[in-house]
Image (tube, grey):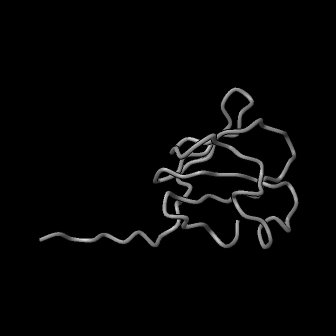
Amino acid sequence: LFSIEIDSSIPNIVRVFNSKNKLVLITDEEAKCAYGTEANYCSIGNVDNGKPMTTGFSKVHQTTWEGGQTYYIKCKDLYNNENNGC
């Protein structure tokens, strides 16, 4: 007898902060996160063509903090569940 657990939910960003001039975000599950600086990244981009915030799957993601910059962030989990927007 066995059970199958299906993960169809996207990773959620649960915390965002600035630490020593790094933009740091924490996700609720292991994920890859990336960002774009143009608003159209939300509708046409995906994690694989964004600027990576992690080198692999992790709950902690970071990049350089640029004051006044807007970061459009997308994350995907081990099962390729990725948010549609930012």
- Number of marks in the image? 0
- Please indicate whether residue 12 sits to the left or right of residue 36 in the image: left
Q: Quadrant of the C terminus?
A: bottom right
Is 59 in front, or is 66?
Answer: 59
The answer to whether residue 38 is left or right of residue 1 is right
Q: Residue at x 68, y 36 (%)?
A: 18
Q: Could you tell me residue 71's position as x and y percent? A: 78, 53
Residue 52 position within the rendered picture, expressed as x and y whole percent measured from the top left: 71, 46
Instruction: Indicate whether 22 appears above or below 14.
Output: above
Compared with 28, 44 (above or below) is below
Q: Position of residue 34 (x, y in %)?
A: 70, 52
The residue positioned farthest toward the top in the image shown: 20
Q: Residue at x 41, y 69 (%)?
A: 7
Going by the picture, which residue comes out furthest to the front? 1
Determine whether, in the image, residue 10 is placed left or right of residue 6. Answer: right
Q: Is residue 77 above or below residue 82?
A: above
- Residue 66 falls left or right of residue 22: right
Residue at horizontal 61 percent and vertical 42 percent from the top: 61
For image coordinates 69% across by 58% down, the residue present is: 47
Q: Quadrant of residue 72?
A: bottom right
Which quadrant: the N terminus?
Answer: bottom left
Q: Nearer the viewer, residue 48 or 23?
A: 48
